Image (cartoon, rainbow, N blue to C red):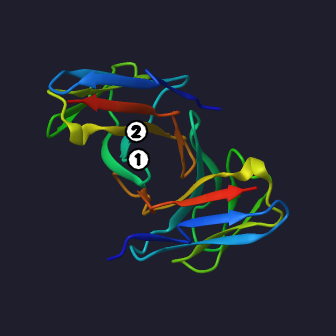
Amino acid sequence: NAGVTQTPKFQVLKTGQSMTLQCAQDMNHNSMYWYRQDPGMGLRLIYYSASEGTTDKGEVPNGYNVSRLNKREFSLRLESAAPSQTSVYFCASTKWTPPYEQYFGPGTRLTVT
Amino acid sequence: SQELEQSPQSLIVQEGKNLTINCTSSKTLYGLYWYKQKYGEGLIFLMMLQKGGEEKSHEKITAKLDEKKQQSSLHITASQPSHAGIYLCGAEIQGAQKLVFGQGTRLTINP
């Protein structure tokens, strides 16, 4: 099992450009999540999908859109990148039965200039 | 909304010393998760606590959840360079399938 995979690992964008971060999991998990991590801020939830076909906003959804393409894949799209979106982005998944642990991808380091 | 406060935010200890990281919640915790992140990598699940007074250990790392279920501590005994990284606590949001995280504690182990 690959677990949770994310692409790309690194990306540099100019202000106003768009891009999609891809995430896939092969653990048959129902729930998937997108977080951003900034220094001193911990992890903040952007969007999540509790199950296939549903998506919900997290703490910091502005400037992002998501698509739960199928049970395996959950993508995050930046329509018009801004310097404030410079961050490390993590995707996670969980089966949401005890012990509810979330499995994280390796992260995408995004810089917006 | 539930908030988690971790202390300290940064910790530098000498190899072999013991240390403690705290995670305090503004509301009752229904599930408290500890994760470790090595620099530049993803998060690795360490352990989860659910019951008041519960204590779990994994190798030299012990985590406790207090009786009132509003604070958890992570204790490392005889620290090693491999313990270096960022430790994050996460809490279940009651009724929702998501976690809220603390801001993290950056641990450095000096040889």
Q: Hey, what amino acid is under mark 2? A: Ile
Q: Is mark 2 on a helix, strand or loop?
A: strand
Q: Which of B42 and B16 is in front in this view?
A: B16
Q: Do the residues labelled 2 and 1 touch (CB within 8 Å)?
A: yes
Q: Name the residue under label 1.
A: B39
Residue at 40% of width from left, 47% of height from top? B39
Q: Hey, what amino acid is under mark 1? A: Tyr
Q: In this view, does A27 lie to the left or right of A92?
A: left
Q: In this view, does A81 lie above or below A85?
A: below
Q: Mark 2 points at which residue?
A: B86
Q: Mark 2 lies on which chain?
A: B
Q: Could you tell me residue A17's position as x and y percent?
A: 81, 68
Residue at 42% of width from left, 55% of height from top? B42
Q: Could you tell me residue A55's position as x and y percent?
A: 68, 64
Give residue B49's quadrant in the image: top left
Residue A54 visible to an observer of this rendering? yes
Q: Could you tell me residue B79's position as x and y percent?
A: 19, 30
Q: How far apart are marks 2 and 1 (CA)?
A: 7 Å
Q: Which comes sooner in the sequence, label 2 or label 1?
A: 1
Give residue A111's quadrant in the image: bottom right
Labels in figure, total: 2
Q: Is residue B71 left or right of residue B103?
A: left
